[in-house]
Each structure stands twice: as C-alpha cells, then as structure tokens.
Image (spheres, helix red, strand yellow):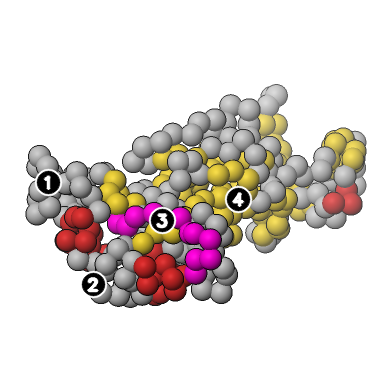
Amino acid sequence: PGMAVGPLVVGTYPPGGVRGFQAEVAWTPAAAQRNETAVCFSALGSNSTDAAPPLCVALDVEADPPPEWVGNGSCADGPAATACFPNATFLIHPPPTMGKRVTVVLTARDPNVYENLTISGTSLPTTSNVELSEQARVDESGYRVVTRTLTWVPSPQEGGQTGSLCFGAAGLLTDQLGNPAPGNRAPALCVQYAVQKCVYRVGTKEALVDIARKFQMSWLQLWSLNKGIRRPEGFGIPGAIAEDDIIYVGQIVKARRGDTLDRIAARFGITLRQLLGMNRDITATVGLLLDQPVCVVPNSCSERG
C-alpha cells in the first residue's frame, strides 16, 4: 500500500549497451508499515512469458522522528537584542524597551530530509510591528534545518506589557500523488517577555516633540523627566537627544499601603485612563500590591488616548 511505479523509460544500459527499461518507484510508508519490510519487483517482457527472477529489497522503516529545536548558544544585548533558548521556555533578556528593536532567532532541525520543515508563530503580539523571515538549508549531518527570525518593536502603548511569543516547528510530507501529509511536531517553544515601563528608545531623527506626541504629553513634560537633555529643540547635536538614546517617558513610583489607582492618579494630577495607558500590566479590576512599580507622568496637562 502507498507505493506507485512511475512510467517506463526506454534506454541503453551497460554492460554491452543492452536495450532496457527503467522506472522510478515512490513509496510513503504508513504508520502500520514500521519495522523491516520486503519489497519485491518482477520484470516481464510484453512478447514473452518468461519473467526475470524477482528482485527483492529489504527496507527498515523507522518511525518519523519529530523536529527538534536548536539553541543558538548566545544572548546578545544591543540595538538588535538576540535571544537564546536553552530550554523550551526562556525569557528575553535584557527586557524589551518601547521603540527598541528586539530580534529573536529560532532554529529547528529535522532528520527526515523528505519533510518540508517550517516554523510558525502561534502566539504573537497583535498591536506591535512584528516581522518574520525564514531560511532553510541541509546541514553537514544531513538534517533539514530551518531558521526563522522574528523582529519586533514594542510600541509606545505597550509599556509594562507581559506575555509570551510562542512558536511551533512541524514537518510536512508530500505523498506520491502530491497530497500533503502532516508530519510530527516539536514541542512548542515560548519566549516570555516583559516590556519595560517609563523608558523609550529614540528613533531615527526623532525630536522630543515627536516622542511627546506619541505618548500624548507636552514636550515640556518630557523634558522635565530627562534632566540631562540641555538642548530639547535639537537632534544629534551636543546636549540634544540622538538615535538609540534611552529616555524617560514617565517616572516609577511604588504603591504604598492602602494605595489604589484612583489615589495615585489624584496624587500626581493625572487621570485613571492615563495611568492605565502607561502601565499595561495593571488593570482597574485588580488591586495594587505593596511596592508594586507604577509609571506616572506628574502634572499631566492632557489625557492620553
């Protein structure tokens, strides 16, 4: 079952240049055909009743091994922080920053080179700038290897957000009729993250007024949070902000005993909506913990949308 013999090809074959025939046999073993299987062939001419002796081939059919994740062995900090994964679940380090690109490189391999191996995202942020690219190759051990790169830039609305980026690696077979046949899957790989609150990475040619607009505050408020900036009107000049600078877009306070979101908002002259917008890890229906960090923008003049 599951075997197909292709069309005969007439040709001249050594030794002696004898006229003969050649055919390709394709077979996708089923799960019930594991272990050793013998496949026999016979050749019979159309004008003869004599057949060649049977040709039998012993095949040792093994179970289809699942793909496996391959760690890249390094965790690098920088403009493009790369995560590594020694285990099935790992934490992106350093923590992502709003506006700063995070790059996660995932690699899986499959000993079954006849499968098309793919890595797919099963849980990705819906509000972020997420890009995915994939490359495939066969390594020196004969394994099919796929590397997928996720690039994610947390938005200004994701300060304090926590969650997981989850991925799956699966093989896909194609039978002799061209129909897809799902292969095995590797265990899900999840990347945990926690976006930092109150800090933002300066982008290309971004001035304070541009960043303030993203967080719906005035540039004077933003300047007051960053005492080291002497030239608030400039970019890339001495005393001004420059690309890749990390600046504060709020200040962290710790919840006191008996604090509520309403009390903190009133203490710093901001609205509850502003407070929740700066802290994606806090909800209005869950009470604050003692010493829980809260990002605030003191004396805010306008409500963030």
Per the picture, the main secondary structure of the magenta-coloured stretch is loop
Q: Amino acid at mark 1?
A: Arg
Question: How many angstroms separate mark 3 from mark 1 (CA)?
Answer: 25 Å
Quadrant placement of the C terminus? bottom left
Quadrant (top left, top right, bottom left, bottom right) of the N terminus: bottom right
What residue is disc 4 on?
Answer: 190
Q: Earlier in the sequence, mark 3 or mark 1?
A: 1
Direction from residue 119 to residue 280 in the image, left or right: left
Dot 3: element: strand
Residue ID for mark 2: 301
Label 3 neighbourhood size at 10 Å, few (<14), some (14-19), many (20+)? Answer: few
Residue 253 image label: 3
Identity of the residue drawn at 44% across and 63% down:
279
Marks 1 and 4, how far apart at CA: 43 Å
Q: Which residues are magenta?
A: 249-260
Q: CA distance from mark 4 to mark 2?
A: 40 Å
Q: Which-is-in-front pick, marks 1 and 4? A: 1
Outermost front residue: 257
- How far apart marks 4 and 3 lie (CA) works out to 31 Å
Q: Position of residue 254 (x, y in %)?
A: 45, 55
Label 1 sits on residue? 230
Q: Which amino acid lies under the numbered mark 3 shown in the image of this protein?
A: Val
Residue kind at label 2, given as amino acid type:
Cys
> Closer to us: mark 3 or mark 1?
3
Front one among 104 and 136: 104
